[in-house]
Image (cartoon, rainbow, N blue to C red):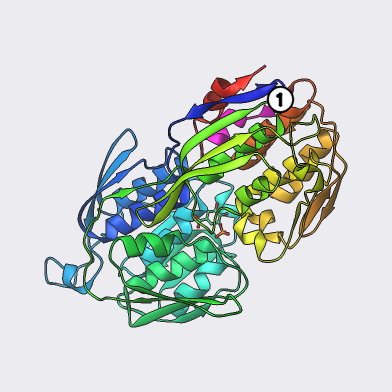
Amino acid sequence: MKIRPARRLAGHLPGLPGDKSVSHRAALVAALARGRSVIENYSTSEDCAATLRCLAQLGARIERTANTVVVEGVGAGEGDDRAGDGAPLLHEPSSALDCGNSGTTMRLLAGVLAAHPFASTLTGDASLRTRPMRRIIAPLELMGARVRSVDGRAPLHIEGRRPLAAVRYELPVASAQVKSCVLLAGLCAQGRTTVVETEARTRDHTERVLRHFGVPLEIREDAASRREISVEGLRGSFAARDFKVPGDISSAAFLFAAAMLLPGSDLRVEGVGLNPTRTAYLERLRALGGLRLENVREECAETVGDVRVRGVAGRRGGKDDEGQAERASFVVRGAEVAELIDELPLLAVVGSQLACGAEIRGAGELRVKESDRISATVENLRAMGAEVTEYEDGLRVVGGARLRGARLDARGDHRIAMAFSVAALVAEGETEIIDAEECVGVSFPEFFKLLDALVER
Ligand code: S3P
């Protein structure tokens, strides 16, 4: 993909493809509900297609027309044993379940499979097979499932058990995927399963989707922001529900960054998911001036709104009336890392264009994403001429960088490809990103087409 610099971004998107995290959960929970759920604005990503394929292999009936997915759920509770012989509700797959590039598919589905009394294998592409899975193996084994792996990596061979034993599990890593894995396993366990989030608040879509489907959850938060989420297992079935997925804020993030950094830009995107565990990035942009939320509303247990961004920040200078961009500070550490996890490479790019630069620490998790995102971000920023320091747990980039076009390697990672497409728009000269078009399909297949329609040169 070759990208030339842009003058500005302008336009109005009346909608956006559905959020990836929410879509996975809506499909999984609908498959465990009894009856037919219609999911609107389902994510167009390859990751979420992998979740649907795996669920179909397990016996859920799924029909898809454009972005609407109809799931005929099989049930998850005691009362759902239709044959009355204790037979599983989802059935044993005849071949391995391929999660592609999708960590969310693998980790959440593992929780579901652990609670079904049959053997199954979860595998994925070369990147997914390098990612750490002990974080889910440990709690699932505590609950009574057996999970074999090679050095804590996929393929995972799961021997499920019903009922699983309920647990109280303190998350050793701030991960929504691990939290969700345990909650989904807990849904089919005997008794009450509690997940304790101590370090940081992670995205809470699983909790919201479960509540939307009528599954009772108890959520307690103490003064120290320690959260305990409890689910009662095997309480009989829950019914199918229709669901509308909000636009994906982590996809929109790239468009917002480009608009913010190019003076004269004016972009309006409707129907963006504004779940408070996902909006730290928007807050960062809002502090630069030029970002407004409009028409904020609740839909299907999620907050949704329209986002308008004007170009006010960046090295080329915009019309920032109050000098907010000049005074901005882009330091991310501690509990905020989890809330910004998917946007950190992009924040480093944005920071490189602000006077303040950017510093990200405590973000070692970035090294075990779809690629080593610390190393990929450092390498590509340097290739474009920025001054960057790499740390084991993060990076620091000097602000006001005059980026120049370069030949970049996205390392097959969708978010790296999109973050550096934004960098390319504000750079001087042409940038080439290897394999960018293929890899953005993992989360946002429409990215380059949309960008092309919005960019003015
Ligand atoms: C996700 C959680 C995060 C995030 C990923 C999606 C989810 O991963 O990076 O893109 O949908 O639960 P971790 O749970 O590993 O932090």
Q: Is residue 41 visible?
A: yes
From the viewer's perspective, tell me whether residue 91 is left or right of residue 282: left
- Residue 79 figure quarter: bottom left
User: Residue 326 in the image: x percent, y percent?
Assistant: 81, 43
Q: Is residue 179 above or below residue 388?
A: below
Q: Which quadrant is home to the C terminus?
A: top right
Instruction: Tell me the residue at 21%/68% (across/down).
Output: 237
Cβ at disc 1 under 8 Å from ligand 1: no
Between 414 and 81, the one lying in front of the other is: 414
Q: Which quadrant is home to the N terminus?
A: top right
**Residue 435 in magenta?**
yes
* Magenta segment boundaries in residue numbering: 431-442
- Circle count: 1
Check disc 1 and report its element: helix, strand or loop.
strand
From the viewer's perspective, tell me whether residue 133 is left or right of residue 416: left
Q: Is residue 342 above or below residue 6?
A: below
- Mark 1 — residue? 432
Instruction: Tell me the residue at 28%/65% (across/down).
Output: 214
Ligand 1, image quadrant it occupies: bottom right
Q: Residues within 10 Å of mark 1 (few under 14, many from 20)?
A: some
- Residue 70 figure quarter: top left
**Residue 387 in magenta?**
no
Q: Residue furthest front?
A: 321
User: Residue 442 in the image: x percent, y percent?
Assistant: 51, 40
Q: Residue furthest left?
A: 83
Q: Is residue 245 above or below residue 155?
A: above
Amino acid, disc 1: Glu
